[in-house]
Image (cartoon, grey):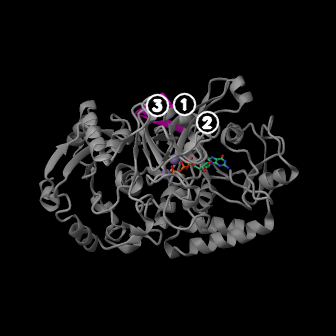
Amino acid sequence: MAEVAALTRPDAIHWCDGSDEESEALIAQMQADGTLLPLNAETNPGSWLHRSHPDDVARVEHLTFVCTREQADAGPNNHWMAPDEAHAKVDALFDGCMRGRTLYVIPYCMGPIDSPLSRCGVEITDSPYVVANMRLMTRMGADALARIEREGAFVKGLHSIGELDPERRFIMHFPEELTIKSYGSGYGGNALLGKKCHALRIASFQARNEGWLAEHMLIVGIENPQGETHYVAAAFPSACGKTNLAMLIPPEGYRRDGWKVWTVGDDICWMRPGADGRLYAINPEAGYFGVAPGTSAKSNPNALETIRKNTIFTNVGLTADEQPWWEGLDNGQQPATDWRGNAYDPDQGPAAHPNARFTVSAKQCPSWSPMAEDPQGVPISAIVFGGRRASLVPLVFEARDWTHGVLVGAAMGSETTAAATGAVGVMRRDPMAMKPFCGYNFADYFGHWLSFDKTGAKLPKVFHVNWFRKGDDGKFLWPGFGDNLRVLEWMIGRVKGEAGGVETPIGHLPTADALNLDGVTLSEEAKAKLFGFERTGWKAEFDSIGEYLDGYGPRMPQALRDEQQRIAGL
Ligand code: GTP
Ligand code: MN
Ligand code: MN
């Protein structure tokens, strides 16, 4: 601490205790300096708008580094810099950077405060906006500090918004030192260090050493009319539907029959084998940092209800009477101001930035599961991988066994979205939705996944879904959202050995009558594409998967190559 203060030279130091008084004082200060703009107190009580710097609106993968001693340990999936060089580079930026600012010390716990699966960290930052967000996204303050003092070990994070200059911006991870240094960005994924930096990049590395998994997955509980709840963990790349699936509202008929959906987590999942051999999962986060555009009373009513109060909106538009607005909100209102604060002009682009977000406490969600506080976590019945694939990939299939499931995850492909800077709509491999987040070599990561298949293990079944298959007219073929419960029901049926499937080289697909499609109209084209296996296309896909795995050289586990070879012969 003294070292950091000597380097960064803040005018003042504040230890965050997480109290309401502290939060109120910070908010008052941010309102006074324009960091937070008050929203309409009647429609959005306790809620604020933050406008980030227009050059600082998304994660920056090209400036994100994993700095292991050996480059090969970071793998071809990460940008790497030698630790000494990285420290020197970023420390030079931190030198004196907090002059005239307050340094905040944020002790936080990822996961329920009394859970053996939880891990703690301390983020030092000069951004009160980061403090306000960390307060919603983590268990921050006195309890976390007490646990840190008891345990000794914690992840050290140092953050400064610096000058918000894209030329002077780095997100550095030192997994061997449990250290993060982030400079020059105030945006969520770059600045809220508990989230992607700690709970995924550093935690995945820690998890490998300690025999658990840190994953970019939602956790959702599906309760059937008999009152039996199955928990499903699902990995989709950023902006591909995790928050939506986690908060799913059952279709009318299902609701009538008594189906319920419980949200445990919408972005990150930490899992480890329990004494009974099953995988148990916690959501390390305490809040949601969700994509706003596209969120509507139709697409995600639970999210809309969650963000009615006590929410921080980042980079959304405003109506004339200071209500938050974004494309796809569809509530009959019109935007007056865009996310930059200019008068809205459709020729100047959307009113909300495509990666505009809301930050809100998870407990405000109507479907919030009290099991999210359970220190033991929830037992996982099914693991789901999925991507945004306009062609080839059917609605759902089931992997044959764990090894095949690991290959299905490793081979995941998806079209890029606005969640990271760069081109949108380009197909890229995003294994297990962890391409931007795995803190070590993917070859070792797949090996770690394979290692869970051991005597006594009762592993979940593994599935793959694609909500984004398009027809010849370029429209989505599957209604998605609430109707995705139909697919989850089939999965749970498979777990229980009750639902029908046909075997194909890529795994089991639902039989024609295995999925409940009551109330859904699908064209013949849609049925063929959503439930069919296209041999020629998959042959090419498997060749491309083989090339991808080969790119990792001899470090890639042989078992995974064998599995790819076995299926490639289809
Ligand atoms: P991160 O929070 O960035 O990790 O992403 P996420 O996976 O939580 O993404 P989110 O749930 O916010 O997905 C946002 C986008 O996916 C929006 O454009 C939604 O409209 C779209 N989406 C979600 N579910 C479905 C679905 O079932 N069908 C279709 N067609 N689109 C969907
Ligand atoms: Mn995410
Ligand atoms: Mn999300």
Q: Residues within 10 Å of mark 2 (few under 14, many from 20)?
A: some
Quarter residue 259 falls in: top right
Q: Residues within 10 Å of mark 1 (few under 14, many from 20)?
A: many
Does residue 248 appear to the left or right of 215 in the view shown?
right
Which residue sits at x=22%, y=64%?
Answer: 94
Q: Residues within 10 Å of mark 3 (few under 14, many from 20)?
A: some
Q: Residue 532: x percent and y percent?
A: 81, 55
Q: Residue 452: x percent and y percent?
A: 51, 52
Boundaries of the magenta span = 363-379
The circle drawn on residue 364 is 3
Q: Residue 57: x percent and y percent?
A: 44, 58
> Which callout, 1 or 2, points to the residue nearer the camera?
2
Height in image: 409 above or below 35?
Answer: below
Q: Which residue is mark 2?
A: 297
The residue closer to the viewer here, 198 or 59, is 59
Q: Residue 291: x percent and y percent?
A: 52, 48
Instruction: Judge whether residue 200 is colored magenta.
Output: no
> Marks 1 and 2: CB-CB under 8 Å?
no
Question: Within 8 Å: ligand 1 and the Cβ of disc 1?
Answer: no
Amino acid identity at mark 2 = Ala
Q: Earlier in the sequence, mark 2 or mark 3?
A: 2
Which residue sits at x=70%, y=68%?
Answer: 541
Does residue 138 appear to the left or right of 412 in the view shown?
left
Q: Give the alpha-carbon distance from disc 1 to disc 3, as whole Å.
A: 9 Å
Q: For mark 1, give the secondary structure.
A: loop
The circle drawn on residue 367 is 1
Q: Is residue 270 visible?
A: no
Q: Give the alpha-carbon distance from disc 2 to disc 3, as whole Å.
A: 16 Å
Q: Is residue 340 visible?
A: yes
Question: Which image quarter is the C terminus in?
Answer: bottom right
The residue closer to the viewer here, 359 or 326, is 326
Instruction: Judge whether residue 378 is colored magenta.
Output: yes
